[in-house]
Amino acid sequence: MSEILINESERQGRYTPAEIEPKWQARWDADGALYAAEGHDSGKPKFYCLEMLPYPSGQLHMGHVRNYAIGDALARFMWMRGYNVLHPMGWDAFGLPAENAALKNNTPPREWTLTNIAAMRKQMQRMGLSYDWSTEVTTCLPDYYRWNQWIFLKMFEAGLAYRKKSKVNWCPECQTVLANEQVIDGCCWRHEDTIVELRDLTQWFLRITKYSDELLTGLDKMDGWPEKVRTMQRNWIGRSEGTLVDFAVDGEVKAEGSTGDLAKITVFTTRVDTIFGATSVQLAPEHAVAKAFAAADASLAAQIEELLEQQKRAREAGDVGAIEKHGIPTGRFAVNPFNGERVPIWVANYILADYGTGAIMSVPAHDERDFEFAQKYSLPVRRVIAPNVDTDAAGLELPYTGEAEAVLIDSGQWTGEACLEAQQKMAAFAAEKGFGTATVTYRLKDWGVSRQRYWGTPIPMVYCQQGHEGLEPGGVVPLPESALPVELPPQVEITQQGGSPLGRVPEFVNTVCPVCGGPARRETDTMDTFVDSSWYFYRYTDAKNSTAPFSSEKAKYWFPIDQYIGGVEHAILHLIYSRFWTKVMRDLGLIQNDEPAARLFTQGMVVKDGAKMSKSRGNVVSPDLMIERYGADATRMYALFAAPPDRDLEWQEEGVAGISRFLSRVYRLTIKYKDAHTAANTLASQSVAGEKLLRKLHQTIAKITQDFSGRWHFNTCIAAIMELVNEVQSAEAAMDSGEVPTATVAEVFRTLVLLLAPFAPFVSAELWAEIGGQGQVFRTPWPVADEAIARESEAEIPVQVNGKLVSVVKVPAGSEDAVVKAAALADAKVIARIEGKTVAKTILVPGKLVNLVVK
Ligand code: ANZ
Ligand code: ZN
C-alpha cells in the first residue's frame, strides 16, 4: 500500500478535513430527515442495516469505529443502489458499570448513563455516521423497558417465565448474583481474587429450552451466518441422542425429605450398546440418591462435602474432563437391568449434576474418562465391543471407543450386533421391558434472568403478603398491563451491602396486591441486561410507539434484518437470546419471521502491537485523537482499508496518515479539473489516453460493485480506487493538453466522487458540491459499469524465435513493450523452445511482432 500513499507531502495543505468535516456535520445534524427511512410505499426494496448497539461507557473505542464504518459504508452503498434503508442506532444502557460509577463518584446511574450517551452520540455524529436518530432507542428509559416488562408478563402467562430455586454464581464481595459471563476463571469480574460461590436462590427463569430443537435446526438454514458462529451455537445447545436406563438400587434407601423415586438410579448414556461393560454407577455429588446415602452415613456425608468443596474450586476450569477425577465408594450397589449384575455405586466429581440425569453407568473399557477413573481406583475393566467378533479382544488397546465400525462381544443376546444398530435395538428393548427409553438431551439450560441489581428493568411481579383465594401467603402475582411501566425509583443509595438495592427502598417495595388489594411486596430483582438487547432491533422500526412494543405491520415490512454486523464475542449469548426472543414474539403473534437476521457479519478485532487494545495494556488508540489529526474520513477509511473486515486489524497511525494524503490527492485533482463539469461539452473525439482512462474507470466500478455485494472486501475496493487515482494522475498531462476530452474528464471525476462516498462521506459531499453535483451524493444512483468499455481490447502478437514463428500471445491492445515482451517470455511454447539458451536480443515491432534472438 505504501507505494500508492507516499510522495504526496508536497501537495498537502489544500485538503482540510478540520474545516470540511464540521461544516458538513453541522448540515447533516440539522437535517433530521436526511437519513430517515422511507415509508413502506416507497416502491423501493427495503434494506435493514444494523450494527450492534454499544454499551454507553462514555467513549467510543476503535472496535466501535470499525464496526460502524463497515455498517455505514454498506448503508450508504445500499442507498445509492436505490434501496429504502433503515440504519438505526441506540444504547444498551442498563448494566453494572453505571452502578460502579455511582459507587465511585457518587453520580446517579441514570445521570452517568445519559451523560455518556450524549457524549458518544456526538462522537458518532462527528464520524459522519448515517444513523436515523429519530428512531434512537435507549434501553434504560421507561418508554423502552416497559415493553421488557410487558413481554415478561406475556411470557409468564404462556408459562415461559417461571421461578425456580437453583444454583447461582454469587460473589461474596459484591453480595450479588453474577451472570456466567461475569465469572472469570472462577472469580468475580470486579474482584479478581474473590472466588465465586454457588448459592441456592429462587430466581426467575425464561424457558429457552422449549425452543432447543428449533434453535438448533434453524441453524442449518441460516446460510447468511458465519459457519463459526453456527458451530458455536450448535455446541452451546449441545444436542445428544441417547438412552435413559434405570438401575435398581439394591437394598433400602431412606427418603429423608428427598423427593422422587430413590429406589432406582436413572442413567443417561449415549452408548447403551456398551452396557454389558458397565462396572459401576457414578453419581454427581448433588444427586438425590447420593444425598440419601449421605444422610444415613456421616463419614460418607463428610467425604461428599469435601468433594463438593474441591469441585467448587475447579468448577470454572470449564471442561470437567480437565479436573482431576475423585470418587467415593458408597458401599451400596445397583442392578444392571440388561444382565442382572450388581455393580458398586460411587459418587464422583466428574459427573455434572445438571446434565442428563446427573448419573452415569461407567464403562471403563470404552470411555476415556471412565477408563482414567477405573485406573485410579482399580475398578474392573470389561471389553464389550471390538472391531469384529473374531478380534482377540484381550489384545485390544483400551479404552477403545469405536462406534461406527465396531460390533458387540460378550453381550449376551446382543453379541455380534453392530454398535449403531445395537443402540437402537437395546433402547427399544429397554422401553419394551419398562426400564428405559430412547431420549434426547440438550446442554442448553433455561435462562436465569434475575439480578440483584439496581440498574436494570424491574421485574413486574409482586408477592401478595396475606395471600388471597387460590394464592398462598407470599405467592407471586403478575401486575396488570395498566400498572406498567414499573419505574425504577430515582433516589437509590448504591452501596456494597448485600441484596438488591431496590429492597432498601420502602416506597418501591411496599405496594398493594392487584388482585385482593392487600399488602404486597414488589419483586426487587431486576432483569439481566441481555433481555434489553434481545429485541431492541424491533423497537427501531417503531421507536415512538406508546401503545405497543412496535407495530406488527412495520416489523413485517422491515424484518428480517438484512445485515447484522457485530463482534464474534456475541456469538453465543446475545445471538442465541435474540433468536429465542424472536421465536417467543412470533408465538405471541407479534411478528411473522422465525429468525431476526438473514445475514450476520462478525468483524475482526482492532489490535495494537499485536494485542487487543485495552486500558490495562496501555495500547489504546483514541478515535478522537485520530479524527483530530487526520479527520473522520481518513480514520474510517483506514479502518476499512487496513485489513479485510473479518480479520484482525493492526492499528498503525502512519496508515491513517497515508489515507489522509491519498484523500488530499483526490481533493487536489478533483478541484483542479472541476471546470470540466461546466465546460461546454465539445464533441471532441475520443483519444487513446481518454479511452484508457475510461477503461480503468469502468473496471473500477465493476470491481467495487462486485466486492461490495456480499463479500465486503472493502480493503480491495479502496485499493481499486487508489489504482484508479494513480491512473488519473498519470494522465494529468494528457488532460491538461486537452488530449482527453473534457466530457471524459468530467465523467471520471464525477464517478470517482461517487465511488468514494460510502467510505469517505465528508470529502465526497464537499467535492460533490464543488463539481456542481445535484442533491446528496449518497442518494445519487451508484455508477454502473459499462462492460464494453471495461473490456480490454486484445491484440494477438506473433512470437518468433530466431525469426521462426513459435507462438501467438494475447495482450491488452496498446500494451507497453515490456508487457508484450513479458507475455512472450511467459508463453509455454516459447519457454520450451528457448530452454537452456540465453536471449541475446529482443526485436519488437509494436503491435505487430516479437522476435527473440537466442544463443
Ligand atoms: C456410558 C458410556 C459408554 C458413555 C461409553 C460414553 C461412552 P454427550 O455426548 O456429551 O451427551 N454422561 C452422561 N451424563 C453425564 C453427566 N451428568 N456428567 C458427566 N458425564 C455424563 O455425552 C454423554 C455421555 O457422557 C454419556 O454416555 C455418559 O457416558 C456421560 F463407551 O454412558 B456414557
Ligand atoms: Zn393478594
Image (tube, rainbow, N blue to C red):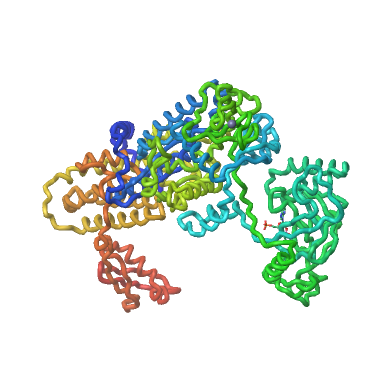
Q: How many marks?
A: 0
Q: Is residue 648 left or right of residue 810?
A: right
Instruction: Give the image location of residue 574, x and y in percent.
Output: 53, 44
User: Is 784 placed above or below 258 here?
Assistant: below
Q: Quadrant of residue 455?
A: top right
Q: Is residue 608 left or right of residue 281?
A: left
Instruction: Give the image location of residue 447, x and y in percent.
Output: 59, 44
Q: Nearer the viewer, residue 784 or 587?
A: 587
Q: Is residue 780 left or right of residue 623?
A: left
User: Is 247 placed above or below 680 here?
Assistant: below
Instruction: Give the image location of residue 193, x and y in percent.
Output: 69, 33
Q: The C terminus is located in which quarter? A: bottom left
Instruction: Give the image location of residue 291, x and y in percent.
Output: 80, 45
Q: Quadrant of residue 817?
A: bottom left
Q: Is residue 516 visible?
A: yes
Q: Is residue 658 visible?
A: no
Q: Nearer the viewer, residue 355 or 146?
A: 146
Q: Is residue 490 left or right of residue 629?
A: right
Q: Nearer the viewer, residue 809 or 844?
A: 809
User: Is 260 placed above or below 853 here?
Assistant: above
Q: Quadrant of ligand 2?
A: top right
User: Is 833 placed above or below 710 here?
Assistant: below
Q: Residue furthest bottom?
A: 804
What residue sits 33% from the left and 48% below the top? 77
